[in-house]
Amino acid sequence: MKHPTRLTPTRFQAVLFDLDGTLLDTAPDFLTATNRLLAQKGMPLLPAESIRQLVTHGSVGIVKKVFELDEQHPSFEPIRQELLALYMDNLADQTHPFKGITELLSALGQQQIPWGIVTNKPESFTLAILQQLPLSPAPATIICPDHVTNTKPDPESVILACDQLGVSPDKTVYIGDHQRDIEAGLRAGTTTIAAAYGYIDKNEDPALWGAHYTVNCATQLLELIL
């Protein structure tokens, strides 16, 4: 694992974040929605940690694991849509920025460094969260699966974000809590930071993802980047 050391400011002109598990802690609301669905179906409720590790895989991963269904099962998509409907009802009740993110965004704003979001979360959910949980300054770009042909780990979304910001990937930092984030960032040509504080499976080791840097808490990002 590479220890956080301050990046040279001239090396970057923009900062990009993955959303779930990197910028925002969205797991509590996923847990609420999942347990509401389980209760409706008369199934045992789940502890927070069991859902936390699944959030990075989205509704597909949650339904696969919790309901033990593959995507070809006739009940898979109906259950997934039920889960998404429940999640939309409470998607920002307990969601919050990770400790240190608010301060980092403020510092980026003060230095007039634009920031953006590159996520595999659908646009409808991403925008709904940001409308209910406004961040300051606001992201200068938001790239969701709706905007690209190929999602992460393909670099298309990261490259599109850089294009929209008018910056070169080699002057950009991309931060994520999954190997696909780091792969996308590396393939796009950005500096990459692995967010080891995010939704990482117990069998995963972020140190093996090949990121330029790894941080164990979001508070380290401010010192590392600025």
Image: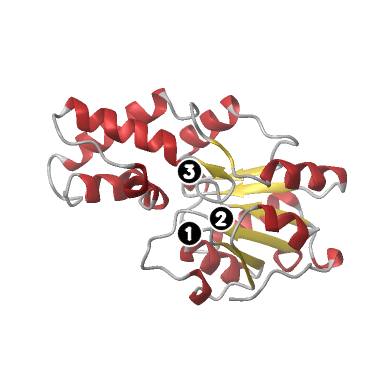
Q: Quadrant of residue 31?
A: top left
Work out how far the residue at label 2 is from the one at label 1, CA to CA, in angstroms.
7 Å
**N-terminal of the two: label 3 or label 2?**
3
Q: Is 39 on the left-hand or right-hand side of 123? A: left
**As shown in the figure, which amino acid type bears the numbered disc 1?**
Lys
Q: Are marks 3 and 2 in contact (CB under 8 Å)?
A: no
- As displayed, is residue 115 above or below residue 39? below
The earlier-in-sequence mark between 3 and 1 is 3
Residue 141, given in percent of the width and then of the height, sits at 66, 44
Task: Name the residue nearer the viewer: 95 or 124.
Answer: 95
In percent of the image, x 70 and y 57: which residue is there?
221
Question: According to the image, label 3 marks what residue?
Answer: 146
> Image point 57% across, 71% down: which residue?
187
Q: Secondary structure at mark 3?
A: helix
Of residues 178 and 149, the one drawn nearer to the viewer in this rendering: 178
Q: In the rendered image, which quarter is residue 74 located in?
A: top left
- The C terminus, quarter of image: bottom right
Q: Residues within 10 Å of mark 1 (few under 14, many from 20)?
A: many
- How many marks overall? 3
- Return the residue at label 2: 157
Dot 2 crowding, Cα within 10 Å, few <14, some 14–19, many 20+: many
Q: Which residue is mark 1?
A: 152
Task: Tell which of 178 and 94 is nearer to you.
Answer: 94
Name the amino acid, label 3: Asp
